[in-house]
Image (cartoon, helix red, strand yellow):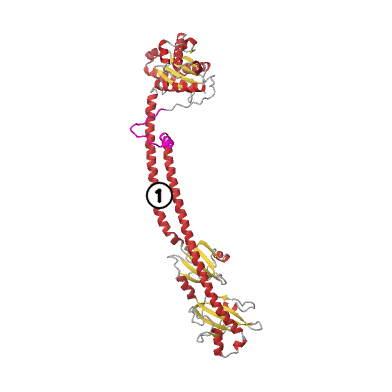
Amino acid sequence: MLRGSFRPLAPLPLQTPRPMRRFDTSFPSLPLGLFGRLAARKPMLAGATGTAISACVLILTFTVLAMGRQQELDRAAASSMNVAVTLSREIARNVELYDLSLEAVAEGASDSRVQSLPKDLRHRVLFDRSTTARDVSGVFVIDREGNFKEARDETAVHANVADRDYFVAQIPRGQEGLFLSRPYQSRARGGASSIALSRRITLSDGSFGGIALLAVNTDYFQSMMQALAVGPHGASLILQKDGTVVARNPRLKAGEPSSVAHSPTFKQMLATEQGFYIARSPVDGLTRLYSFAQVPDTNLIAVVAPSYDDVLSGWRHRSTIIGALALVLSTAFTYVVWALAFGLRYRIALQAHVTHVAHTDALTQLSNRGSLETSLRRVWNECSAANVPMSLLFVDADRFKAYNDKFGHAAGDGALRLIADCLKAQTRSDIDVVARYGGEEFVIVLPGAGLSDAVRVGESIRACIQSSSQGREQSGVHPVTVSVGCSVIMPSNGATTATALLAADRAVYAAKRRGRNQVSAATAAMYEPTPRQESLAGTETH
């Protein structure tokens, strides 16, 4: 805003003059389009854009690598699930075959007619249909007291098994189904590790008559586990639903728990027939991908668990190489972009400095006469387009030659700087144009201001200079006054900027003739051009 009583008219769509930037024509012009021109003006934006591009490339690279990691896990999960399901079906098929043999033994042992047969014939009837698979270590008939009554292998050592879980579980009425025992050390076979399959023998009156027993070596399950390739740190297991480990690859070491019932993730295996999860092993503490499938119609669960580190080892190797290359290349690209950006900024700053020096008065830091001519044409074109007036103020220091002669040129320079400060303080920095015209003369261009507004601004400038120069002798500035001439032109009357300058200059001399230190408005006669002015007017832009 202007100081004093002046109130500017409505804001015009004017732009603050920008210093002209001239680039070295020896550099070829690149067809970079809008972004190229924007980057040339704002090199830091180009640097930030290059950094953003590098960051996006890195993010995209790491996103793809993360997707590759998940794909590795998904493939491993699908593969191990297929193996676990196949394994559970194989075990179920063999258990079904064993159970058929066991049913035949239980039916014969409960038939009184079979029991009345001679021993050799009874043995043939009971065991001829029993399986002869090499993993079946024995087929037995156990009486109601838990003693061995019949055996497929007549040389087997007889023992009492009344305390075994496979015997106790069959005693209650209604327990005629198949029962799989926990692993145990066989008393009849010298402590061999076995799992028993038992069925209840129910007599004709419904009472408990003993059990039919089929013993399977746990080596059968262990050999199945050893045949699976689960990686250097993977594991495969056969579990029972109470958490007991039947077989494991690798084998359990001394001191490692033989049950996983205490594991918080074991409940997931009981909750669904098959599934997958990632967890830390309760046996050896390694993180694995657990795929499991319950064996149908049994209390067994087949588990295949490749190691998390084994599954991702290849991916980690590839990701390390790709990620390092992406990081190095992105960093190098960012460095080059910023180097170019800073180089371009320095070039622009240097160009702007040269332009500023060329268009600025060194003493007062106001626009010089060459810059004034360019700004004056621009402002007049904008006022013409908006059909608003443009006012000019011509400011001339009073008796400045005598001032210099009396106080010295240093004091004169200080007075000019004080005048420039007052001019800037009393005008609109983002709209008005303030320039040193030459020597002790200054010109102010007021877009959109009428003559009365120009007079008010001139008066505020005159008063500011007079009051600011008082009492500053110690700083080398002595009292100084100015005379101000004001003129105004309208686009509609065909006036030119030269006419406005002429009228304002004549008004200044009118003020000096009236005694100086005052503001004078140009009269109509002052706008009349001289013959020389008429020749200049033909070259002006309206």
The crowding category of the residue bearing disc 1, from other C-alpha atoms within 10 Å (few below 14, some 14 to 19, many at least 20), is: some
Identified by mark 1, the residue type is: Ala
Q: 138 and 495: which one is in front?
A: 495
Residue 342 picture location, percent across and down: 38, 37
The residue wearing badge 1 is: 326
Is residue 521 on the magenta stretch?
no
| Any part of residue 432 in sight | no
Instruction: Describe residue 316's horizontal placement relative to residue 129 as left or right.
Output: left
Residue under the image location 38 percent in, 47 percent down: 329
Q: Is residue 384 left or right of residue 22?
A: right
Residue extending furthest toward the left: 26
Name, please, the residue furthest toward the right: 205
Which portion, as a residue range, is magenta? Answer: 19-40
Q: Nearer the viewer, residue 12 or 434?
A: 12
Q: Is residue 165 left or right of residue 379?
A: right
Residue depicted at 58% across the width and 76% down the height: 178
List x then y, in percent, for residue 93. 53, 73
Q: How far across and how far down the image is residue 500, in percent? A: 46, 15
Figure disc tally: 1
Q: Is residue 36 magenta?
A: yes
| Displayed quadrant of residue 340 | top left
Position in image of residue 501 (x %, y %): 44, 15
Q: Is residue 203 above or below residue 238?
A: below
Main structural element of the magenta stretch: helix, strand or loop? loop
Between 155 and 191, the one lying in front of the other is: 155
- Left or right: residue 178 versus residue 346 is right
Q: Is residue 267 visible?
A: yes
Q: Is residue 127 above or below residue 261?
A: below
Secondary structure under badge 1? helix
User: Is 159 or 201 nearer to us in this picture?
Assistant: 201
